[in-house]
Image (spheres, rainbow, N blue to C red):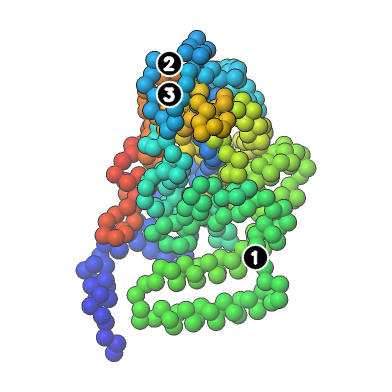
Amino acid sequence: MKTMTRRELLRRSGLGLGSLGLAAMLHASSAANPLAPRQPPLAPRARRVIHIFLNGGPSQVDTFDPKPMLARYAGREIPVHLRTERKTGAAFPSPFAFRRHGASGIEISEIFPRLAGHADDLCVVRSMHTNIPNHEPSLMMMNCGSELLVRPSVGSWVTYGLGTENQNLPGFIALCAGGLPTRGTFNWRNAFLPGAFQGTHVDTRETDIDRLIANIRGPHVSREQQRRQLDLLGRLNADYARGREEDAMLDARIQSFELAYRMQMEAADAFDISREPLVVREAYGGTLHGRQMLIARRLLEKGVRFVQVWHGAGQPWDSHSEIEANHSRLARECDQPIAALLSDLKQRGMFDDTVVLIGGEFGRTPTVELAAFGSNLGANGRDHNSYGFTVVLAGGGFRRGYVHGATDDFGFRAEQQRVHVHDLHATLLYALGLDHEKLTYRHAGRDFRLTDVHGAVVKELLA
């Protein structure tokens, strides 16, 4: 008879009781497959999420939060105390016109003419705020719920709580072209959650399927030979694990091998947009962002739980200079694909149970940024602003044709019905049927959650 170590005895007896409760909550039957679909504890409004990340910080006063007061103060100091990274100057009116759209009359900038056609489907949150006006911490806050420490990303938490509906594809996929964003893969990593919940990065610059999904097929062995290899590898790993404590890294490696094997047929189909009718491809546009948005819809349709689509990873919305030219170009790249996505989701009966989240990590100042260091930094541009910005939600049980909250008269600080990033995360989880206070994971002696010890569900955002 094998003698148990003291640690094993404690884990299997008294200290193991805590894990029993967690296993019951997440359905112990799925232990062999951590991505098996699970029923959420609350009544869900949505089943899946697409997060369209406008990397770099789009300007709220040039997109979804019109401020006519800026024109009255043009070239003058505004009566608001600005706390920014760099020195800013006078009020800088938006170079773009805003118009009311739809029965709701939501005001949207002229740079989003096609998205504006969906105004009555949008839930515009104009009172967002976050903690720090730097890209690195704000990206981590929006994607992982913590600006300083490495934490699991939102997509990892969602797949941890719900699993995924297609066992032949990853549950969480990040479509990011043109290089990695600031903090790279930290934006979609699993941190201390099991490795199966890490986001799978796909560089959508590639159009050839074998390059888009590298190493998905073995060129020198058949699928039958691969299956025998994996079975042998599984037996070797089982022998290694026997008599040892649970090894999360080994479990993740085993799951990765198995998923890669299952992906060989399904992934090629999911990522091959040539299988779509020409009229659909033309609706999204033939651009890189149009292609990756169409891929995202195909992934959602095939049961992937969480898809993040990055826009501006290589050339971000970080318009410290020439905001008119830069925001115009960036909006042109994504306006048609986002509008096409919303129409496509409706036509396929997926809009009501898909959360669409659009936004960046923070906003920008209503004042012009002054030139610095002998460069053109600040020439008709705006600095970072964590005190007030906008995100847009659609589908998934969120209110339609609704504007929530407001910034001050100049668009700098959220003042009415303020929504912190923690609140946004809590509300997103609630829409998926998850309680942000109870979706926890035990690590380093404490229970962690996406919202840490903060956050409240903003019921006003929900239909």
- How far is the residue under mark 2 from the one under mark 1? 56 Å
| Residue depicted at 50% across the width and 71% down the height | 254
Answer yes or no: do the residues labelled 3 and 2 have beta carbons within 8 Å?
A: yes
| Local SS, label 3 | loop
Q: State the residue position of label 2.
A: 78
Image location (x, y in percent) of residue 435 = 35, 45
Q: Please, which residue is most extreme toward the front here?
A: 374
**N-terminal-most mark, 1 or 3:** 1
Image location (x, y in percent) of residue 319 = 56, 32
| Local SS, label 2 | loop
- How far is the residue under mark 1 from the one under mark 3? 47 Å
Amino acid type at image mark 1: Ile
| Residue depicted at 45% across the width and 72% down the height | 250
| Local SS, label 1 | loop
Local packing at callout 1 (Cα closer than 10 Å; few below 14, some 14-19, many 20+) is some
Between 56 and 153, which is closer to the camera in this rendering? 56
Amino acid type at image mark 3: Phe
Q: State the residue position of label 3.
A: 412
Quadrant for the N terminus, please: bottom left
Is residue 141 left or right of 308 when viewed as pictured? left
| Res 170 → quadrant | bottom right
**N-terminal-most mark, 3 or 2:** 2
Q: Which mark is residue 216?
A: 1
Between 152 and 233, which is closer to the camera in this rendering? 152
Between 24 and 116, which is closer to the camera in this rendering? 116
**N-terminal-most mark, 2 or 1:** 2
Please tell me whether mark 2 or mark 1 is closer to you in this view.
2
Q: Please, which residue is most extreme toward the right here?
A: 278
Q: Please, which residue is most extreme toward the top here?
A: 72
